[in-house]
Image (spheres, rainbow, N blue to C red):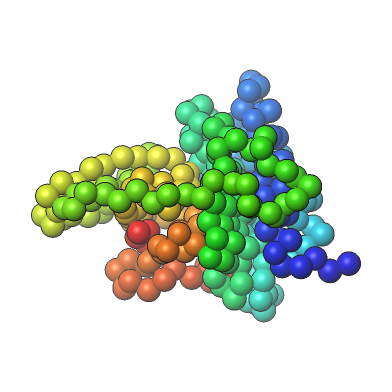
């Protein structure tokens, strides 16, 4: 039986919560970490989360691009109208450092644009979810009725906190702060009376902006499409966006190279 598109969103929520439970089991154990390449690490939590997500999303019959699997060749995936873009464990450095700032990211993509996104923060039991124009946050996932997903009616609608006039709240990566980002912040200090700086790991930075706890996230360093897509969907549903830097065009996906351009989320 074909699954209606809105039900896909429920599958993404289900997958994120189940993967988060797998991640926490590893997090609370004496786990082993290995270097995947010179810039990234991998643990058994990454692979366990990947397997769980792919298994739960399988009934949607949509292809999956995940950090923990080899993507289909571009000549194949460029024909996809819809697919899943997944980071099973975003913020592996934060996971290894045990600071709780790691997430599960799942985005539903349509013609190169994120139309739904789920970000789950397992260590804090916070779930951020967006489907097209709807954005919600849940700070106690035990209250979620898995039988009625993707019904979001009992969830908390997120209020947007407005910053004071003349104040810019910049949020940056906890583990990847580039010289270019530092220079950008210096330039903002010339334009605003006050610039407040905070940091966070993983895709939490997008959630902070969507919820009005920060105004702007400049990322002038390497990221991959799966790092950003779910946060991008959530920002769009909250009336914000992610823009390429320096041309200001909206960030796009399913490129021949899955590396992102530099961007500013605001």
Q: In this view, does 137 lie above or below 72?
A: above
Q: Residue at x 80, y 65 (%)?
A: 3
Quarter placement of the N terminus: bottom right
The answer to whether residue 47 is visible is no
Give how far across and how far down residue 212 sits, in percent.
37, 50
Quarter placement of the C terminus: bottom left
Give how far across and how far down residue 242 sits, in percent.
41, 63
Looking at the image, residue 1 sits to the left or right of residue 260; the answer is: right
Q: In this view, does 246 lie above or below 99?
A: below
Instruction: State the residue in front, 69 or 129.
Output: 129
Q: Residue at x 73, y 43 (%)?
A: 145
Give how far across and how far down residue 193 sits, in percent.
12, 50
In the figure, residue 81 lies in which quadrant?
bottom right
Looking at the image, residue 52 sits to the left or right of residue 90; the answer is: right
Looking at the image, residue 37 sits to the left or right of residue 250; the answer is: right
Q: Which residue lies furthest to the top in this view?
A: 30
Q: Which residue is drawn at 54% across and 32% down?
A: 124
The answer to whether residue 195 is visible is yes
Q: Residue furthest front?
A: 154
Q: How many marks?
A: 0
Q: Residue at x 67, y 50 (%)?
A: 13
């Amino acid at each position: 039986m074909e699954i209606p598109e809105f039900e896909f969103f429920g599958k993404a929520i289900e997958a994120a919560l189940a993967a988060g439970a797998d991640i926490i089991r590893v997090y609370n154990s004496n786990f082993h970490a290995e270097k995947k390449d010179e810039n990234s690490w991998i643990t058994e939590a990454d692979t366990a989360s990947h397997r769980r997500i792919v298994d739960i999303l399988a009934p949607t019959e949509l292809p999956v691009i995940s950090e923990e699997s080899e993507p289909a060749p571009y000549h194949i995936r460029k024909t996809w109208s819809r697919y899943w873009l997944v980071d099973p464990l975003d913020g592996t450095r934060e996971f290894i450092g045990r600071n709780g700032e790691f997430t599960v990211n799942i985005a539903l993509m349509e013609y190169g644009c994120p139309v739904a996104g789920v970000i789950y923060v397992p260590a804090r039991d916070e779930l951020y979810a967006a489907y097209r124009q709807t954005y919600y946050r849940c700070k106690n996932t035990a209250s979620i009725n898995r039988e009625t997903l993707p019904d979001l009616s009992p969830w908390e609608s997120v209020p947007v906190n407005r910053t004071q006039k003349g104040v810019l709240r910049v949020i940056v990566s906890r583990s990847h702060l580039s010289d270019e980002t530092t220079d950008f912040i210096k330039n903002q200090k010339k334009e605003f009376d006050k610039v407040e700086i905070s940091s966070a790991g993983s895709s939490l930075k997008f959630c902070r902006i969507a919820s009005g706890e920060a105004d702007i996230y400049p990322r002038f360093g390497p990221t991959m499409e799966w790092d950003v897509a779910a946060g991008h969907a959530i920002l769009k549903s909250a009336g914000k966006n992610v823009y390429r830097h320096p041309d200001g065009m909206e960030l796009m996906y399913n490129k021949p190279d899955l590396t992102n351009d530099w961007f500013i989320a605001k």
